[in-house]
Image: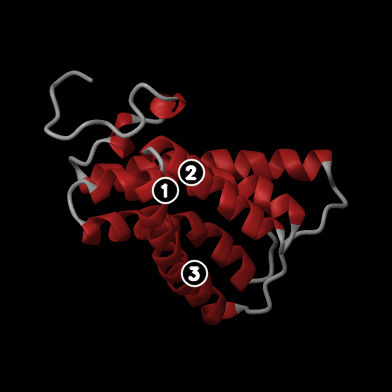
Amino acid sequence: MSRKSVLPAIGAGTPLRFLPEAIRIPEKPLRAIAVGWLTAFPASMLFAAIGAMLLPQAEQPEFRVSGAAAIFALVVFSPVLETLIMGGGLLLLLKIMRPAWAIVVSALGWGIAHSSVAPIWGLVIWWPFLVFSTLFVTWRQRSLGLAFAIPMVVHALQNLLPSLLVAYGARP
């Protein structure tokens, strides 16, 4: 860190310190959103591609919506609902464990939850939820509203391209 922040970096001194400071220090919301998306999306697409290569017969998640309904479901509804659930869970976890552990437990929990739909999906989803959870815990230092809003926007951006593929018949 080149300058002193008023609030500490989440994950400093833990294995999460490899994550970009822009998502671990609650200073610039737009930067956190951009870096959060750039940290989550390419890596999750790489995990998805590797999973598809290694396990080509693996069951993929199936979406029973198309067109505008798919875009709404994946870009608006899902990020809002899942961020509200994730945030509530993190607020409880933070009462019983250190922030870095709460973030890891949250991400693993979301991976397991998505694996119940399609096992390979959980292997892809844990990474973006690590980023979303980090953003939530980071921005919780500033305000509860930002703690929910910033990961919600990053989640919506994460789902945007896949939602377009689902909406118009291609598989992500």
Lower sequence index among marks 2 and 3: 3
The N terminus is located in which quarter?
top left
Lower sequence index among marks 3 and 1: 3
Horizontal relation, residue 120 to residue 155: left or right: right
Q: Name the residue under label 3.
A: 78
Residue 28's x, y, as percent?
Answer: 19, 42
Which residue appears at 48% of the width and 61% of the height? 160
Q: What element carries label 3?
A: helix
Q: Name the residue under label 1.
A: 133
Residue 80 image-quadrant placement = bottom left
Residue 17's x, y, as percent?
Answer: 39, 25
Horizontal relation, residue 97 to residue 78: left or right: left
The amino acid sitting under disc 1 is Ser
Q: Are marks 1 and 2 in contact (CB under 8 Å)?
A: yes
Q: Which colour scheme is used?
A: secondary structure
Q: How far apart are labels 3 and 1 at the CA level?
A: 15 Å
The amino acid sitting under disc 2 is Leu
Q: Name the residue under label 2.
A: 130
Which residue appears at 35% of the width and 49% of the height? 95
Between 106 and 160, which is closer to the camera in this rendering? 106
**Mark 2 residue crowding within 10 angstroms, few (<14) / some (14–19) / many (20+):** many
